[in-house]
Image (cartoon, helix red, strand yellow):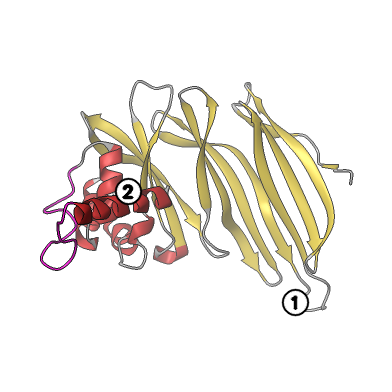
């Protein structure tokens, strides 16, 4: 998504050159005044060409806390901000805004709710720990018009000889993020005191049908793969959450 936004900007700049218009020098690429709270796609594009002060102003008007907004819009990180539509079964319209790792070594995902015609405000959020690197997220669909937020590699614990990350799926119900799947997707242990070999467990996930997700876990020792295991997560309507089968060894 970030690449597509930067590509859009490059095409705009190229069009100025083709028309014989100066791109730099006296001509300033950007926007004047505040970024309007408008369509999600328009705000996302405006974030690419706006300056840090304009990005900060928009985030605060959307309801993001000033400390978080200021950290996210520093020149080093501000191009990593992204706004996307979020489809649900509700008659209301939602979006999601992602902010990069910065304040207190955390990244943030905010749910936006339309409070008027193309008027938006935050209604919920989650903070993601960045101790072991930048968490990632993607939108997955369980059914047409129903998105869920799939977060991977958010740090869930670290200490002497251990680092753990977590994968979590959130559904959006009445503007709130509800956790429906949570599991360790990375674990690294090493003999900090006794010199035992480093062991790494790393999971990947594949949605094989609407509400069925396959998890494959690779275990390695000192960088050498030892085994692959697999299990299936299925939706349990009575619990309104995913439930996993036991892991089974994947044959070579």
The prevailing secondary structure element of the residues shown in magenta is loop
Q: How far apart are marks 2 and 1 (CA)?
A: 48 Å
Farthest residue, direction right: 251
Q: Are marks 2 and 1 in contact (CB under 8 Å)?
A: no
Q: How many marks?
A: 2
Say left or right for 63 vs 124: left
Which circle marks residue 41 in the picture?
A: none
Residue 163 appearing in the image? yes
Residue 241, percent from left and from top: 61, 30
- Where is residue 114, by image quadrant? top left
**Label 2: element kind:** helix
Specify the segment rendered in magenta: 19-36
At 45% across and 24% down in the image, what residue appears?
A: 145
At 77% across and 38% down in the image, what residue appears?
A: 231
Residue 149, percent from left and from top: 50, 39
Comes first in the chain, label 2 or label 1: 2
Residue 67 is one of the magenta-drawn residues? no
Which residue bears the numbered disc 1? 192
At 33% across and 28% down in the image, what residue appears?
A: 93
Mark 1 surroundings: few (<14), some (14-19) or many (≥20) residues within 10 A? few
Which residue bears the numbered disc 2? 8
Say left or right for 220 vs 146: right
User: Relative to 92, is 78 above or below?
Assistant: below
């Amino acid at each position: 998504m970030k690449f597509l936004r930067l590509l859009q900007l490059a095409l705009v700049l190229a069009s100025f050159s083709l028309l014989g218009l100066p791109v730099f020098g006296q001509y300033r690429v950007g926007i004047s005044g505040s970024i309007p709270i408008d369509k999600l796609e328009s705000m996302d594009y405006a974030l690419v060409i706006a300056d840090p002060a304009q990005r900060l102003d928009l985030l605060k008007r959307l309801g993001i806390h000033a400390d978080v907004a200021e950290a996210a819009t520093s020149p080093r990180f501000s191009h990593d901000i992204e706004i996307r539509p979020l489809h649900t079964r509700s008659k209301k319209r939602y979006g999601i805004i992602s902010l990069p790792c910065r304040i207190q070594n955390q990244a943030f995902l905010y749910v936006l709710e339309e409070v008027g015609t193309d008027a938006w405000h935050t209604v919920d959020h989650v903070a993601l720990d960045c101790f072991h690197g930048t968490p990632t997220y993607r939108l997955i669909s369980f059914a047409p018009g129903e998105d869920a937020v799939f977060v991977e590699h958010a740090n869930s614990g670290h200490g002497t000889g251990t680092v753990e990350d977590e994968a979590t799926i959130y559904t959006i119900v009445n503007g709130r993020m509800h956790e429906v799947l949570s599991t360790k997707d990375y674990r690294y242990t090493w003999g900090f005191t006794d010199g035992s070999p480093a062991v790494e467990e790393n999971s990947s996930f594949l949605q094989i049908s609407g509400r069925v997700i396959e998890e494959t876990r690779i275990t390695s020792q000192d960088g050498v793969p030892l085994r692959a295991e697999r299990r299936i997560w299925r939706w349990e309507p009575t619990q309104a959450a995913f439930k996993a089968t036991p892991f089974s060894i994947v044959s070579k």
